[in-house]
Image (tube, rainbow, N blue to C red):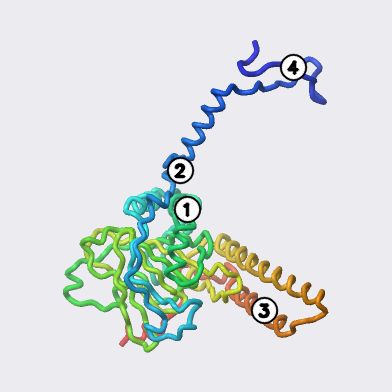
Amino acid sequence: MATEGISIGGTPERFYSNTINTPVVKSSSKETQESLKRSFQKYLASEQTSSGPLFIPSKHLAYDEPKHIHTMEDIGYSAANGVSPMAVSEPFRLFSEEAVDVMRDEIFNVEAGDEYTYASNIAPKQLRGYAPRHGKFTFNAWKHPETLAIISKIAGIELVPVIDYEIAHINLSVPGDKKELAEGTNDDDDAIVGWHRDSYPFVCVLMMSDTTNMVGGETALKTGTGEIRKVRGPSKGCAVVLQGRYIDHQALKAFGGQERITAVTSFRPKNPHVRDDTVLNTVRPISNLPDLYNQVMEYQLENAEARIRGMLKDVRDSMKAGTTDVKAIKNFLDFEIKALQAVDAEIVEESKVVKGHLPPICESAKRRKSE
């Protein structure tokens, strides 16, 4: 009996039995083709995938510009201290509440959670590296061009996520009792993430908890003059952009409420010619090192490749013109040597990495605590 839609005929293929002919698929009818087309369009328009909702910028982005963006000079540093004059933004709305709820669901539904859960001497509980595999909505939200355009505008420089592994690093904590706040507390004692500088140039910190009954939760910054300045904490769906590689800071504890969950996504300049001051000392002890090292090396090599191709073109142009630019060659070589040395210093053998132990970053803050 012939299968519907398939007829038997034609010349047998080589090595086929002489008694078996190759099936020939009949052309689909126009109605069938239209039905398939409609089904495909319906799939593309669907807000659901097999792994959950799709990120739709028009629905899930709720951007409202920050009221103020503090510059490096505002907090006592040189404008050239980082890779942008910008230091930190005031909280601004970034994602809709619905988007944050989907992100929360992905956090709490992570399979094999222990694989992604870390703790350190400056933070009690963190979730890292889950997004590419278990947080598709979260992953796509942070990598979407419209999201990146917003973050870049605030930062004053075009940014991209530093690596996929650093998308939506989650800090989890339980706020203290409001009675503790009334009795007076020490900021260093009540930091949910202690004094540190980030490993990467920029971070965007997204609040994922309802902060209605919370008090506190600010980000404390150490200014260039040694003073401590606080930037108020964001509410659910709101975020703060910070050039955290160049500023000592800590996340202060919140009081009241049931939990405090923040997502921290790290960014770097997209331009491969901008200096890269990335270090791994604050992430190496709380990471799956194969993921961390391979992804860091991938983007470093891609950036180096882009610079080398550009320099190769310049050299070939000089050869055609019968000239040479020694200063440009020297600058190129100096940049590449320093870049390679910097990366080499950060790729530490796994046997030498102490899991969960981050080195002290802000010694002056530690001294204040002991006084």
The residues bearing labels 2 and 3 have C-alpha atoms spaced at a distance of 44 Å
What percent of the width, then of the height, locates residue 210? Answer: 27, 58
Determine the residue located farthest toward the front in the rendered image. 321
Q: Which residue is mark 2?
A: 51
Q: Which residue is mark 1?
A: 140
For marks 2 and 1 on the same chain, the one whose residue lies earlier in the sequence: 2
Q: Quadrant of residue 94?
A: bottom left
Q: Which residue is mark 4?
A: 9
Q: Is residue 259 left or right of residue 14?
A: left
Determine the residue located farthest toward the top in the rendered image. 1
The answer to whether residue 293 of the structure is visible from this angle is yes
Q: Quadrant of residue 238?
A: bottom left
Q: Which residue is mark 3?
A: 337
What percent of the width, then of the height, locates residue 365? Answer: 36, 83
Q: Is residue 324 left or right of residue 220?
A: right
- Decide: is 103 above or below 344: above
Q: Is residue 283 left or right of residue 185?
A: right
Q: What amino acid is labelled 4 in the image?
A: Gly
Mark 4, mark 3: which one is toward the viewer?
4
The 10 Å Cα crowd at callout 1, few under 14, some 14 to 19, many 20 or more, is some
For marks 1 and 3 on the same chain, the one whose residue lies earlier in the sequence: 1
What percent of the width, then of the height, locates residue 224? Answer: 40, 86
For marks 2 and 3 on the same chain, the one whose residue lies earlier in the sequence: 2
* Residue at image point 46% right, 70% down: 202
For marks 4 and 2 on the same chain, the one whose residue lies earlier in the sequence: 4
For marks 1 and 4 on the same chain, the one whose residue lies earlier in the sequence: 4
The residues bearing labels 4 and 2 have C-alpha atoms spaced at a distance of 42 Å
